[in-house]
Image (cartoon, rainbow, N blue to C red):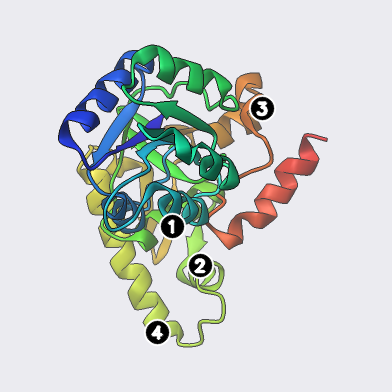
Amino acid sequence: MLIFAIDDEPVALLVLHNAIAEAVPEATIMEYDMGTAALESMRKHDLRPDVVFSDIKMPQLDGLALAAQVRSLSPGTKFVFVTAYSEYAFEAIQVRTSGYVMKPVDANAIRREMENIAPLRAEMPGGLWVRCFGTFEVFWNRKPLLFARKQTKELFAFLIDQEGSVCSAETIITNMWEGETDMAAGKDRVRHLVGDLKRTLSSIGMEGILIRRSGQLAILRDKVDCDYYRMLDGDMAAVNAFTGEYMTQYSWAELTTGRLYFRER
């Protein structure tokens, strides 16, 4: 589980972090002293937090505006306001946040909010874990694996979606960049992304899951642990974890989303 803690006051941020860590010990917590910094992290590294705990009254970008922008980037993220100003309760309701916590924050308050939030995904295993339900995320030893480029992460997502099937550069280009007419430029872009993906996987000793032969690409399905594959293999916990959302940031994933949805009806 990935949780963002945001507060422009250092002491308040430390208190918030400690309260979350005590209440949700299995979570990966990322701290930010500005809402703008959290948004930049989401955009740059394509991070999609499960929950955001944020102060409301902050410079540059207040919590109310931040909640709207987070929602546009990651519709599935739960947003909880943390503030000393009770008069903001009405505004919090207006933007449909998941919760509201008054300062000073403690672990019990965080636990209550987490219990009120719709059930989140089960605790992830160690090693390489790929989450396809909701937004696509990749974790290494329960921490987000950072990709140098958004499209590198998207390429990995596409290969996961293909379930180990061999993909040509043309297949990747057609799906990831609909309307691309310069195939030579597209192939050059794919080549750079493949190199970047290989370096990212090599950094965690997992380059062996990537197969590259004669200009074609695939992943070794049985070497990848993810909720999507577990569901296909009949794991009931994974089946129950699917709520109709699959790799929601990628339009090409809609076909698989529909197939999974009707599979479960």
Location of the C terminus by quadrant is top right
Task: Name the residue at the left extreme.
Answer: 10
The answer to whether residue 30 is left or right of residue 247 is left
Q: Which of marks 1 and 2 is nearer the N terminus?
A: 1
The answer to whether residue 2 is left or right of residue 92 is left
Residue situated in front as seen by the camera: 58 or 86: 86
Would you say the residues marked 1 and 3 are in contact, meaning their CB atoms lie under 8 Å apart? no
Q: Position of residue 108 (x, y in %)?
A: 41, 12
Checking the image for residue 184, the label placed there is 4
Q: Which of marks 2 and 3 is nearer the N terminus?
A: 2
Location of the N terminus by quadrant is top left
Q: What residue type is labelled 4?
A: Ala
Would you say the residues marked 1 and 2 are in contact, meaning their CB atoms lie under 8 Å apart? yes
Checking the image for residue 176, the label placed there is 2
Mark 1 lies on a secondary structure that is helix
Q: Which of marks 1 and 3 is nearer the N terminus?
A: 1
